[in-house]
Image (cartoon, rainbow, N blue to C red):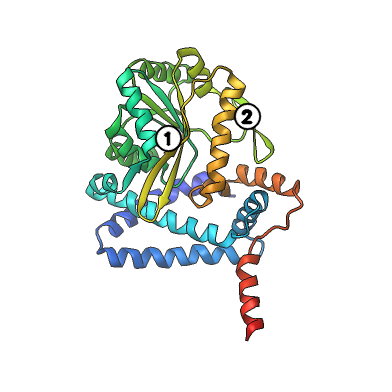
Amino acid sequence: MMHFRSVKDSIAQPLHRFGRLLAGSPRSLSQTILGTLGAAAKAAYFVPGSHLSRAVGNFCRVTGRTDAWPVYSRMVDNLQTAALQFARLHRHGRSELLAQTAIAPAVAAGLQRLRQDGTGGIIVVPHCIGAVLSSAKLSTVCPTLLLVKEPRDPGRCELMLDYVRKLGPEYLLARRMPPATVMRQIVRALRDGKVVVGTTDLVNAGDDSVKTKIFGQGIFSPGWPARLSARFNVPILPGYIHLDGDQIILLGDEAYVAGDLDRGTQRWAASFEKHFRQYPSDWAFMLDKNWARVLAAAAASTSTTPPFRSDFFSGMSERAGQR
């Protein structure tokens, strides 16, 4: 049996070449090609027993939504937008990306205060569709260290770094270094007044994880942000990346200094859940097998009727009845 990691390793180069071809094509042609691929991805939602409809349906059941199909459809559209942005970034540089990325005023004001005070900070974000892309704009506002969990495959790792280098921020490869070395590099960056950015919406227990709750379910979340915040008196800013058409927007909640490991971690986890509920189509990571299990358990504990594809087919039934 071929594992998902092997599949990603084998298709990385073909996808890269395909992306460069799209980026060099007229905009109308590239959008047509992506639209065709997007239509196929949307059609997969309606395959009987589809993991896609089940995971998104469970999310909507848990959150009381009845728009599972629109949530998934827009998710595919967002993925198409991000894929084209990555392709254009690699072929043409980041100028277009910078023009299409915005930082919410409250977040920009918080970052400005950090620069004035000369202190570092920690931005935690979930695996949103435009999360990595947003770091290009962030690095023009404040000195930034991007934590990168690089692929194990050397070829795919080097290919990924081609994109990361074009984004612009300083980066740290968190997988190939010993954990103690990674922590020393992060601490040095914080002491130098840099903003450390990391994706933190993991689920399973690790060497440095804290029990938290999201969607009413117990999960494990990384403890390093709250641990470093409390020790070095630097704020945590819970962030979220929202795609609005072609615009990439960095949102965030109020920054805080963690005084307690458990409560400090739960606070940013709660911020993530709030934004998941508000902008679910940006959170394609709900389709990850681990998050899908969390959502399935949460859905099983609620009595709400699961929407799945009912919002789509009920509309068809109503129109048929009218005829």
Q: Is residue 164 above or below residue 2?
A: above
> Is residue 3 visible in the rendered structure shown here?
no
Q: In which quarter of the image is residue 314?
A: bottom right
Q: Quadrant of residue 204?
A: top right
Q: Residue at x 63, y 47 (%)?
A: 292
In percent of width and height, residue 162 lies at: 30, 40
Residue in the picture at 50% in, 24% down: 225
Type of residue at label 2?
Ala
Which residue occupies the foreground of this view, 198 or 230? 230
Q: Which mark, by number, is residue 9?
A: none
| In this view, the mark in front (1 or 2) | 2
Q: Is residue 189 above or below residue 5?
A: above
Reading the image, the residue beneath label 2 is: 205
User: Is any part of residue 164 visible from this angle?
Assistant: yes
Within-10-Å neighbours for mark 2: few <14, some 14–19, many 20+:
few
Residue 317, percent across and down?
A: 65, 77
Does label 1 or label 2 sit earlier along the sequence?
1
Q: SS of the residue at dot 1?
A: loop
Q: Mark 1 points at which residue?
A: 150
The quarter in which the C terminus is drawn is: bottom right
Q: What residue type is labelled 1?
A: Glu
**Can you name the residue that lies furthest to the top here?**
231
Query: Residue at coordinates 43% horizontally, 23% vertically from top-left?
Result: 177
Q: What residue is shown at x 59% (from left), y 57% (from top)?
A: 52
Q: In this view, does 145 lie above or below 38?
A: above
Q: Where is residue 280 in the image (x, y as percent from the top left)?
A: 53, 50
Q: How crowded is mark 1: few (under 14 residues within 10 Å), some or many (20 or more)?
A: some
How far apart are the two marked residues, 1 and 2, measured between alpha carbons?
A: 20 Å
